[in-house]
Amino acid sequence: MSDSKTQQSSPTSGSLGSPAGIANHSSAARPDRYDPRAIEQKWQERWARSSDLYRAEPSTTSRKKYYVLEMLPYPSGALHMGHVRNYAIGDALARYMWMQGYNVLHPMGWDSFGLPAENAAIQNQTPPREWTLRNIAAMKRQMNRMGFSYDWSKEVTTCLPEYYRWNQWFFLKFLERGLAYRKNSKVNWCPKCATVLANEQVLPNGCCWRHEDTLVEQRELEQWFLRITDYAEELLQGLDQLPGWPEKVRTMQRNWIGRSEGALVDFKLAGAAGPAGDKISVFTTRIDTIYGATSIQLAPEHPIVTDLIANNPALLAKVEDLIAEQRRAKESGDIGAIEKHGVFTERFATNPFNGEPIPIWIANYVLLDYGTGLRVRQKVRSRHSRGDPAAAGKRSSTGG
Ligand SMILES: [Zn+2]
């Protein structure tokens, strides 16, 4: 293809009445066509020589600061057009803010501490470190070819000790203060990846995103948890100090955090019990409404559900459907938009306050992730009450 010499040999476009000041420049040969290989390479080399070009000024400067941070890519080996679109938007914003006179910090880095690196290394017979660092170098070259305006002096690579030593340090602090603990939890497991998958990595048909012919299993594994519920009250109070946030977002946050004050009530399961025991623990913030409880709604993955479906294939099929619906809703990114329904288990539990039998349901809108994984329905509700008065299952009652 052409090189920078093309510029000289191409026909000149003439001066076209350019102002005198740039006559010298425009009288030089200018090609009719834009030749990216010649022009961009020339400027990229020039930009590479000025290492301070996109460097943020020290925080002590008086100029107003602006931080542009895009999601750090996972170094899979090559940028694709999705990356280019995403990073071009951040790049445009950073340049716009520079032109507005801001001291812009626009860093880049690599989300490179991934389990897939291990599998790729096994497949390619290359040590993970070598494979990952080579991919990073390749992607960085691509980013520079795109002309993105990064402050590379702030580059972070999460698979290198200089970065992850801080993760370890944080974790040890959590452990020292009793905020990190272990318990069993259901996870998505791909037998081919031999790793845990995030919900977004499970396809709508229940298969692995990397192995479209392999069904993802639900496995109970011992996991580490952080006792973030200890900070629920503080977080809730902090929400009131966020002026300018849409009320819709604050409500979502409030529901996500849940309440930290409430009572744990044990409902005894009527009839035969299985390995999960004969007790259903409900966390409620409205113990005053407990007499009005009309049903218990369990998350489809609640441990007691396993017992209830053990000898009931019809119920098992329905529960599998509910789990699939939840997975689809999680993938679509809006679990709140799920069309709510449930199935009656034909079993009852006893309200410890009045001895009344309460029907047990399994509902598609109750998530095990959110604490106890169940809710209690009340028949008595104030006309003006907002949301779910029981709010059960929003906070982990097991606590580890
Ligand atoms: Zn897989």
Image (cartoon, helix red, strand yellow):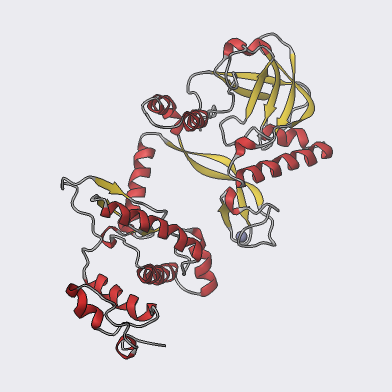
Q: Residue at x 68, y 60 (%)?
A: 214
Q: Residue at x 66, y 11 (%)?
A: 380
Q: Nearer the viewer, residue 95 or 249?
A: 95
**Is 239 positioned to the left or the right of 200 in the image?**
left
- Quadrant where ligand 1 appears: bottom right
In the rendered image, residue 237, in percent from the top left (x then y), is placed at 39, 24
Q: Nearer the viewer, residue 7 or 348?
A: 7
Q: Residue furthest front?
A: 17
**Is 24 positioned to the left or the right of 125 in the image?**
left
**Is 333 positioned to the left or the right of 73 in the image?**
right
Q: Residue at x 47, y 69 (%)?
A: 78
Res. 281 image quadrant? top right
| Count of labels in the image | 0
Q: Would you say residue 92 is visible in this rendering?
A: yes
Quick check: 126 above or below 251? below
Q: Would you say residue 278 is visible in this rendering?
A: no
In the rendered image, residue 367, in percent from the top left (x then y), is placed at 62, 35
In the rendered image, residue 40, in percent from the top left (x then y), is placed at 34, 75
Quick check: 329 above or below 241? below
In the rendered image, residue 163, in percent from the top left (x then y), is placed at 33, 55
Res. 360 image quadrant? top right
Considering the image in quadrants, where does the N terminus appear?
bottom left
Q: Residue furthest bottom?
A: 9
Quick check: 25 above or below 106? below
Q: Nearer the viewer, residue 239 or 368?
A: 239
Q: Residue at x 31, y 89 (%)?
A: 5
Res. 379 image quadrant? top right
